[in-house]
Amino acid sequence: MGNGNSAYTELGIDLDTSGTAGLYNKYSTDYVIWANDAAKAVTGNDFRGQGPDLSPNFLMNQLFALCGWKGNAYMQATEEIRQQMPVITTIGRFWWDGEYYREADLPEEARALLQRFRYIQYYQENNFQG
């Protein structure tokens, strides 16, 4: 939206990612998970309502949860992480216990979970190429 987000600036839209409002304004994108009538009948889920905030890497987890599927070992391991930390950004912001944190400010339990996610991701990327 313009050179250096100039259109946003002219409109007075906060893009300061150090705050939650700016983070949402700059990076949030609505998503839709659509199901036809057959999928609704098979899963017993009407697929209505607003889903949770989550990072793109967890979209498949959300779909699997709505369908009642477990998925492979990777999906199961990352689902445990999604339940506690549904937003893991590439700009170093993480959703934990109802608020956003910078990585350095995450509580120890959250840092350990984030490290576990990184280990799982590394293992998946380096051992399951097809």
Image (cartoon, helix red, strand yellow):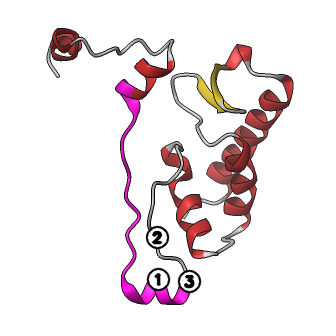
| Label 3 Cα neighbours within 10 Å, binned few <14 / some 14-19 / many ≥20 | few
* On screen, residue 49 above or below 34: above
The residue lying toward the viewer, choosing from 124 and 52, is: 52
Q: CA distance from mark 2 to mark 1?
A: 7 Å
**Does the magenta segment cover residue 7?**
no
Identify the image quadrant of residue 69.
bottom right
Which percent across, then down, holds residue 96? 69, 32
The residue lying toward the viewer, choosing from 58 and 22, is: 22
Q: Which region is colored magenta?
A: 25-44
| Label 2 Cα neighbours within 10 Å, binned few <14 / some 14-19 / many ≥20 | some
Q: Amino acid at mark 1?
A: Lys
Q: Which residue is mark 1?
A: 40
Which percent across, then down, holds residue 66? 57, 69
Residue in the picture at 18% in, 14% down: 11
Residue in the picture at 78% in, 31% down: 110
Could you say which disc has been placed on residue 47 in the image? 2
Could you say which disc has been placed on residue 56 in the image? none
**Does the magenta segment cover residue 40?**
yes
Q: Are marks 1 and 3 in contact (CB under 8 Å)?
A: yes
Q: Are marks 2 and 3 in contact (CB under 8 Å)?
A: no
Quarter of the figure with the N terminus: top left
Q: Which residue is mark 3?
A: 44
The residue lying toward the viewer, choosing from 118 and 60, is: 60
Q: CA distance from mark 2 to mark 3?
A: 9 Å
